[in-house]
Image (cartoon, rainbow, N blue to C red):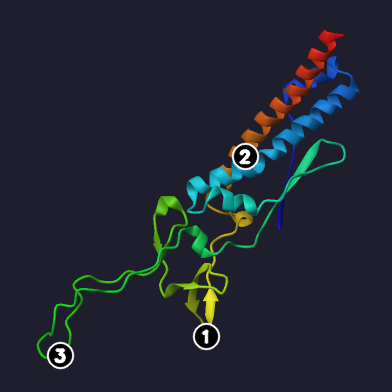
Amino acid sequence: MATVRFEITGLDQLARMREVLSPQMLAKATRAGVAHAAKGVAPKVGQSLAQRYGIGSRRVQQDLRAARLAPDGLSATVAFSRRPPLLTQYGAKPGTRASGQPGLGRGRGWGRPVKPGKPLSALLLRSKGRQPIPGAFMVTGNNGNRLTARRGRGGKLEALYGPSVGSIFAGQSQIGPALRAETETMIRARFIAGFQRVLDSAARGYGKG
C-alpha cells in the first residue's frame, strides 16, 4: 500500500485570513477545505489514469482508500493500492488464429495461411496503442470472470497483471509527475472552495443576526 500525504501551504490567501479571522473560524475553515480537497483525490486520479491508460476510472478508484484527515485538520492522507489489477482490466483482447489455408503446396503439406493470426493484446499506455502479449490467452475462472493467463513452468497457468495504481501515481512511471501535478492543482482549487464555503456560511449567519 502506497500513501500520499498532502497539506495546504504557501497560499497567500491563508496568510491574509489569519489577520481577520478568529483562530476558531480559521481552524474550522481550514479543516473544511482540506476535507473537501481530499474527497476529490480519488475521482481526479481515476479520471487522469483512465485518460492515459486502458483501465476504467471506476476500477482505479477501487484501489484508493478513503482519505484520512489528520487530527489538526491541516493535512490528509490517501492510500493507493500496490496490488496490480488483472491484465484483463487493461482492455485485454483475445488473439486470433491464422485462417484461410490456400491448399496443398508442392507436395510439402499445407501452404502458409492467407491471413496470419494475432497474439492477445492489451491497452496499457493509450499513447502506445495496443501491445501484443506473446503466449497469453484468455481463460474463464470458476467464478465466471475472464482472466488473462500464460503457461509457466510445468504447464501451470499464471495470471497476468498490469501496473498497479500506486506504482503509476506514486512511483517512477512515465506519467507519474504529470499526474501528481494535476492532482496538486485540483487539491488547491478544492481547498479554496471548501474554505470559502465555511466563510460564506458564517457570513450569512452573521447577517441574519
Position above or below: 27 against 157: above
**Label 3: few (<14), some (14–19) or many (≥20) C-alpha neighbours in 10 Å:** few
Query: Of marks 3 and 1, which one's residue comes earlier in the chain?
Result: 3
Mark 2–mark 3 CB contact (< 8 Å): no
Q: Residue at x 61, y 56 (%)?
A: 167
Query: Of marks 2 and 1, which one's residue comes earlier in the chain?
Result: 1
Q: Which mark is residue 183?
A: 2
Q: Answer left or right for 156 relative to 166.
A: left
Q: Can you say which quadrant of the picture contains the N terminus?
A: bottom right
- Which of the 4 quarters of the picture holds residue 30? top right
**Label 2: few (<14), some (14–19) or many (≥20) C-alpha neighbours in 10 Å:** some
Position above or below: 70 against 9: below
Per the model, the C-alpha gap separating discs 2 and 1 is: 42 Å
- Which of the 4 quarters of the picture holds residue 171? bottom right
SS at mark 3 in the image: loop
Q: Position of residue 208 (x, y in %)?
A: 83, 9
Q: Which mark is residue 153?
A: 1
